[in-house]
């Protein structure tokens, strides 16, 4: 193996006595992609900010081309050939594509910006990326994928040798993600070193040559991707066996509760059919744009289907609103807990009671004592860490906010519980707690539909897996037969 293009050794960083990084190490090879893996709070963002000059390390060494390098600012990073493509595009929508590409260093002639050359050079860079984007187009007119491509062109413009990609496909469709990964391969062929950060293990196994795992601010594992496995990476990342992260309880599967047949809401999804039974967790997997959330929103009455039938406990159901769905026995924990799931400025008691006010009230008047009793029951049952039921939800950690949202819908006493990305954005300890709760609820006979983009979660918690692609059902796989390769094959065009 050749000497690394970039090497971090013993890098440490603290904030107010809290250690964010502790003796972290990283090596990036020219012409290769290294996956940076770790849970939220592991130190990935801090490491990237040190690498790009936003933070300065308290200790440690950074070498580029075998020589010591000091990165005091983003400008230093750029001069050293380091560029970053963020998950949320850092671009200027009011400027043109060409102006964004050369925002940092536009070509000049006679002390002034050489506009014709700027547009020509931008067109040449876009051509190298096999893009037909017009350099004169306002950037605000582009899709998220288009804006990512402009950021990559910007990296080429500054002749970046080290390109950091932070969750670059998080908001992209499957086709757009494939196109971006093809560009990553071309960047590798050109000899650039890629630091690739993603929670999508299927992408890591596909695009990365090497990996480095951070846990609690320290490097706990590194090596070649071809020599490791999905389970091994998860165990390194979490610091515990996979079985502890996904504590699936074995329980008896009962009678059918919900049946969906030929459900369509064009263009989001077509001819979706499945069933879910008492005590069962039905996992629903698919990439961005598969239509998973749209199906769940239809079941919850947020939109009406064009065709198809929904049957609950043997009776036809056509929920025209969330109120009607709740009355029928369907509850839905939405994907975005902060915008759709919780009222952050209100108390835990208020949040849990809100969908159940009609039942908790008496004579048309709310009863604080009954609401508090319900909240305290769920605080104990779900082990919500809080001061008391009157504490504001916005003061809680992400994992405890998620538990409040879950309690809110469980208080409606549903027959079917839909959870959309139930562990998104929470740490591994909170994930294990949510998984344990879902397993216990299933053991009590609740029918659960779990939508997730995390393949390990789907494989670890589901009794059956419904795989969607481009708005259609592509596979229904029993747990005993499910493998990562089989699910990914059904979810993609491979």
Image: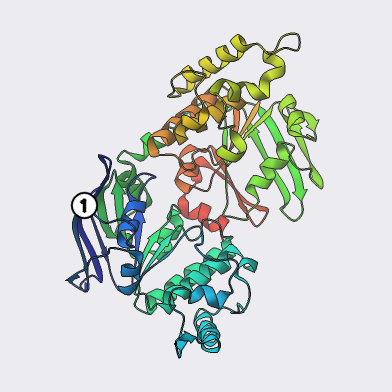
Q: Position of residue 328 (x, y in %)?
A: 74, 26
Residue 325 vs residue 89, the one in the foreground: 89
Name the residue at 28% across, 63% down.
72
In the figure, is residue 467 to the left or right of 484?
A: right
Q: Is residue 94 left or right of residue 227?
A: right
Residue 347 occupies quadrant: top right
Circle 1 residues within 10 Å: few <14, some 14–19, many ≥20: few
Label 1: state its secondary structure.
loop
State left or right for residue 262 relative to residue 220.
right
**Rendered image quadrant of residue 79:** bottom left
Residue 76 at x, y percent in the picture: 31, 69
Is residue 252 among what the camera can see?
A: no
Query: Residue at the spot x=29%, y=59% of the render?
Result: 227
Q: Residue at x 78, y 34 (%)?
A: 319
Specify whether residue 15 is in view: yes
The residue under the point 49% across, 62% down is: 90
For the C terminus, the image quarter is bottom right
Question: Which residue is the extreme one toward the bottom?
Answer: 110
In this view, 236 is above or below 28: above
């Amino acid at each position: 193996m050749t000497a690394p293009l970039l090497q971090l050794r013993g890098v440490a960083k603290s904030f107010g006595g809290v250690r964010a990084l502790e003796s972290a190490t990283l090596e990036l090879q020219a012409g290769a992609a290294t996956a940076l893996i770790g849970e939220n709070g592991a130190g990935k963002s801090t490491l990237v900010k040190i690498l790009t000059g936003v933070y300065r390390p308290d200790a440690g060494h950074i070498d580029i081309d075998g020589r010591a390098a000091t990165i005091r600012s983003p400008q230093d990073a750029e001069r050293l050939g380091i560029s970053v493509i963020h998950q949320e595009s850092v671009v200027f929508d009011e400027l043109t594509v060409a102006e964004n590409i050369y925002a940092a260093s536009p070509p000049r002639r006679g002390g002034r910006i050489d506009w014709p050359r700027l547009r020509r050079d931008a067109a040449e860079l876009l051509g190298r990326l096999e893009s037909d984007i017009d350099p004169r187009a306002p950037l605000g007119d582009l899709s998220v994928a288009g804006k990512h491509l402009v950021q990559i062109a910007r990296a080429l413009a500054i002749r970046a040798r080290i390109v950091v990609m932070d969750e670059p496909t998080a908001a992209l469709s499957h086709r757009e993600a494939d196109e971006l990964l093809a560009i990553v391969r071309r960047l590798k062929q050109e000899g650039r070193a890629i630091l690739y950060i993603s929670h999508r293990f299927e992408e890591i196994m596909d695009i990365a040559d090497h990996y480095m795992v951070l846990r609690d601010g320290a490097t706990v594992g590194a090596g070649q991707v071809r020599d490791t496995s999905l389970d091994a990476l998860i165990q390194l990342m979490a610091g515990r066996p996979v079985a502890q992260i996904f504590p699936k309880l074995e329980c008896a599967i009962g009678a059918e509760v919900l049946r969906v047949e030929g459900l369509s809401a064009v263009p989001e999804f077509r001819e979706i059919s499945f069933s879910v039974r008492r005590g069962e967790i039905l996992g629903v997997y698919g990439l961005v744009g598969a239509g998973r959330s749209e199906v769940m929103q239809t079941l919850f009455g947020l939109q009406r289907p064009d065709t198809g039938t929904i049957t609950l406990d043997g009776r036809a159901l056509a929920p025209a609103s969330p109120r009607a769905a709740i009355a029928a026995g369907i509850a839905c924990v939405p994907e975005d807990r902060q915008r759709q799931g919780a009222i952050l400025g209100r108390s835990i008691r208020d949040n849990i009671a809100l969908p159940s006010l009609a039942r908790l009230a008496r004579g048309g008047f709310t009863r604080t004592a009954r609401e508090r009793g319900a909240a305290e029951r769920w605080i104990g049952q779900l082990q919500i860490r809080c001061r008391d039921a009157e504490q504001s939800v916005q003061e809680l950690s992400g994992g405890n906010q998620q538990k409040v949202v879950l309690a809110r819908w469980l208080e409606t006493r549903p027959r079917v519980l839909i959870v959309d990305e139930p562990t998104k954005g929470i740490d591994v300890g909170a994930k294990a707690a949510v998984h344990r709760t879902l397993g216990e609820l299933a053991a009590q006979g609740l029918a659960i539909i779990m939508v997730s983009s995390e393949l390990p979660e789907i494989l670890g918690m589901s009794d059956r897996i419904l795989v969607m692609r481009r708005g259609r059902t592509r596979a229904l796989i029993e747990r005993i037969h499910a493998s990562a390769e089989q699910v990914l094959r059904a979810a993609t065009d491979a």
